[in-house]
């Protein structure tokens, strides 16, 4: 049905976008998980999508003001094949993981997220955090905005990758910064911005 004053656009172009077009149509906020594990390749793909190095000189998949890269990404692995339960820090250079703490941190993160217990059923939880000072030294008061933009880009990259992999994922922003930083064992000056529970889905996502 048309409305006066509205110029209607053609249907979105899919040809030439490859899997990205499918990801746009498939992306949902999924909070139901089957309990099946993530493969190590799936976990690595999500981390690469968020902050992986895709060009020479260390440039990454998400745009960063001044290429200062203030984000730090963590993986709280509970059920990831070939990976023991624990909290890991993603190392973009070399595309690797460094283990921060041992043990399953999913329930602790769910508790830190105001008791959202469904999060603990995800196979893993990505934590997107920021060191604002890295950007502030160049951009001053604008740095908070630029860093938050970057976190949004990184999170959407991961969400679209999850959609293409057929995984359930959503973004959680309601949590105690101090408690999440403690669970992830973040370095001083690091601020948690988003938690992203992910895993194979249980049923239809909303």
Image: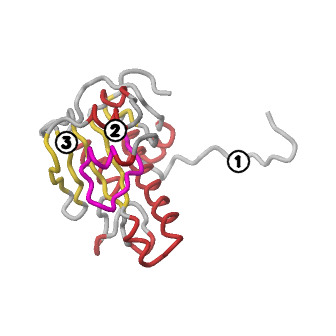
Which is closer to the viewer, label 3 or label 2?
3
Q: Tags 1 and 3 in contact by the CB under 8 Å rule?
A: no
Q: Which residue is labeled 3 in the image?
A: 40
Quarter assignment of residue 65? bottom left
* Residue 131 image offset from top left, x and y in percent: 36, 63
Q: Which residue is labeled 1 in the image?
A: 9
Residue 135 included in the magenta stretch of the image: no
The span picked out in magenta is 179-196
The image shows residue 34, relative to residue 77, as above or below, that is: above
Quarter assignment of residue 180? top left
Q: Which residue is labeled 2 in the image?
A: 165
Depth order, front residue of 48/176: 176
Q: Residues within 10 Å of mark 3 (few under 14, many from 20)?
A: few
The quarter of the image holding the N terminus is top right
Secondary structure, mark 3, is: helix
**Which colour scheme appears in the figure?**
secondary structure
The image shows residue 147, relative to residue 31, as above or below, that is: below
Is 178 situated left or right of 9 in this image? left
Residue 193 included in the magenta stretch of the image: yes
Quarter assignment of residue 130? bottom left
The tag earlier along the polypeptide, 1 or 3, is 1
């Amino acid at each position: 049905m048309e409305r006066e004053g509205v110029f209607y656009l053609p249907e979105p172009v899919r040809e030439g976008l490859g899997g990205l077009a499918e990801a746009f149509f498939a992306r949902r906020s999924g909070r139901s998980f089957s309990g099946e594990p993530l493969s190590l390749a799936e976990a690595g793909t999500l981390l690469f999508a968020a902050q992986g190095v895709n060009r020479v000189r260390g440039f990454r998949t998400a745009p960063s003001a001044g290429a200062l890269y203030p984000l730090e990404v963590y993986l709280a692995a509970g059920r990831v094949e070939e990976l023991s339960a624990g909290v890991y820090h993603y190392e973009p250079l070399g595309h690797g993981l460094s283990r921060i703490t041992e043990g399953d941190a999913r329930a602790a993160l769910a508790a830190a997220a105001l008791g959202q217990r469904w999060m603990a059923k995800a196979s893993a939880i990505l934590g997107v955090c920021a060191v604002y000072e890295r950007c502030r030294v160049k951009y001053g008061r604008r740095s908070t905005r630029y860093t938050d933009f970057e976190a949004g880009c990184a999170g959407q990259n991961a969400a679209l990758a999850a959609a293409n992999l057929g995984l359930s994922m959503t973004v959680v922003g309601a949590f105690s910064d101090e408690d999440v930083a403690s669970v992830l064992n973040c370095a001083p000056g690091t601020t948690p911005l988003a938690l992203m529970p992910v895993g194979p889905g249980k049923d239809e996502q909303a």
